[in-house]
Image: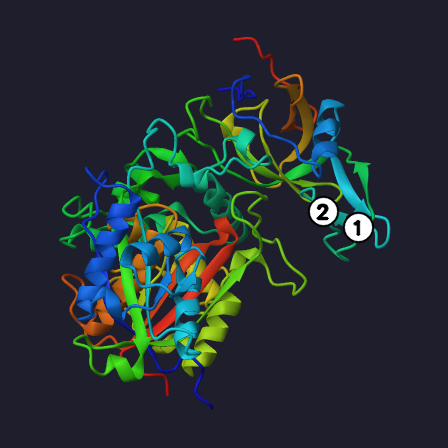
Amino acid sequence: MMLKPQRPGIPLPVPTIVSAPFWEGCSAGEIRYQCCNDCDAITMNPSPACSACFGPNLRWEASSGKGSVYSYTVVWRPQTPDFEVPYVPAIIEMEEGFPLMSSIVGCDVEEIEVAMLVEAVFVKMSDEITLAYFVPEGRDLPDLAV
Amino acid sequence: MPKHFLHDVAIVGIYNTPQARVLEDHDSDTITVAACRGAIADAGLTPADIDGVAAGGKAAPLIYWMRNGPAWRSMNPPSIPAVLQAAAAIAAGQCHTAIVTDGMAGVYTQRRSTAPWTRPSNEFVVSYGMFTAAEFALIARRHMYLYGTTPEQLATVSATIRNNGHVHPDAIYRGRGPFTPEDILASRMVADPFHLLDCAMTSEGACAMVLTNAERAADMPQKPVWILGGSGDTYGPSYQHPPTWSFSGRSGEINGTVGRRSAQQAFGMAGITHKDVDVCEFYDPFSFEIIRQFEAFGFCQEGEGGDFVMDGRIEVGGEFPVTTDGGVMSFSHGGAAVQQLQRITRAVEQLRGNCKSQQVKGAEVAMATNGGAGALFTDVLLLGSEKAA
């Protein structure tokens, strides 16, 4: 069974003053993450302070969008009825070295394993929100039609 | 070694209301008040004897309803940290007798969704369908990848705990077993690797306990159960950030072993080691969490937890009996905090020696825990039938 992104209608994020650039990045087709101008450390999830020096001088960088599966779970009992099962929440270890919460699509459940190489794809869910999903490296986003 | 500052604080009253999937004619306030009445009576006291309340957002209302203000209060979530805070307030003389309580009823009504406390609407998890089972599954999967931990080992934990609930007359799932690991593995999948029977239930109920100082405890009817040690560890807010096994703070210690620092502190306060623990009333939101806690607390080496829980070691009669009332899988899971307090009340029953079922003979030291790596926190409380040395 080919895993697909969820359809519009699921609960969507409400960006904050801190996280808005991350979600703007998704809309622009890239994963953005924070870097410290003072100590160069990466901070992710978006935070009001550098995760290494606690300083305020953070800038946004664009990730390659590539990573590997750190862990995953195949969910058969949905969070709310808005979600179609099965779906596969996963922690992606990005090439730049930070973990990202996302979901794997574009393959069968049986294909997924820890350490599998994946890359980001982007699915517009509303005028404001585009979500990042991940597909096995080299695959395309599955056809969203029924 | 000098006595630690909670040395002379005891738990002298406990009470669990009836627990059920749904408690008709109750809301969270009425069931919590019922638990308070029970615990105060168990301690041989009246509300006039209570001058401290730790109950999260219910602390101030309870003080008003009891009309025992001015009173000390803690609005921390009522779990192990609140018990330690109440004990500290007693030790410091800010109050002499405190009640710690929580209860929930009538909160989980949209049954096609997972319970509301399992799915915080945080922007980084909500759209990926995350809820507690998935959060803890991501931790378990990583451990299975790193160490070869098996679904059968997880199922052995579930079967053991559910069998404890099977024989507990007050457990919601009494009489539902007995279970074999094969039964667990045959239940439907919720969030791989967790089958339905690897997961906590949802229910309603309340729990309360009364703490006081040694001088007052001497005049009370119940055998006091003493605070030997305790602490709490967190890496951040639950269910917002990826529940990553190797996530670490500045210390270099990882979320996969969250609770290790607490356990070391608690054992240090108590002047004992894990070998002295007679009963492990560990928090059991998902089967793997028990395996993880044995590793984090130093009962076994990292990666060895899967083997450690096999061969009857964690059954009553084994070396380290675990979650002897059936825990949140089978006894009750009333919401965000009440079921965390119930690990403590069960430890008290074990040390009083009057459990209705699965009494560990001669139990003198009990370890109660809350939380788990999927939630980025773990708290530890050591209790004893005698004061710490």
The disc numbered 1 marks a residue on which chain? A
User: Marks 2 and 1: CB-CB under 8 Å?
Assistant: yes
Query: Amino acid under label 1?
Result: Pro
Q: Residue at x 41, y 51 (%)?
A: B57
The disc numbered 2 marks a residue on which chain? A
Q: How much space separates mark 2 and mark 1, taking CA atoms?
A: 7 Å
Asked whether, in this view, residue B252 is left or right of residue B192, the answer is right
Q: Position of residue B210 (x, y in %)?
A: 28, 67
Q: Is there any visible trace of residue B325 in the rendered image?
A: no
Q: Position of residue B217 (x, y in %)?
A: 25, 79
Q: Where is residue B214, by image quadrant?
A: bottom left
SS state under label 1: loop
Asked whether, in this view, residue A80 is left or right of residue B345, the answer is right
Report crowding for label 2: few under 14, some 14 to 19, many 20 or more residues within 10 A (C-alpha).
some
**Residue under label 2:** A48
Q: Residue at x 83, y 51 (%)?
A: A40
Up the image or down, B323 lies above or below A120; here it is below
Q: Nearer the viewer, residue B33 or B146?
A: B33
**Residue under label 1:** A56
Q: Where is residue B308, by image quadrant?
A: bottom left
Up the image or down, B84 lies above or below B8; here it is above
SS state under label 2: loop
Q: Is there any visible trace of residue B118 in the rendered image?
A: yes
Asked whether, in this view, residue A98 is left or right of residue A6, the answer is right
The C terminus of chain B: image quadrant: bottom left
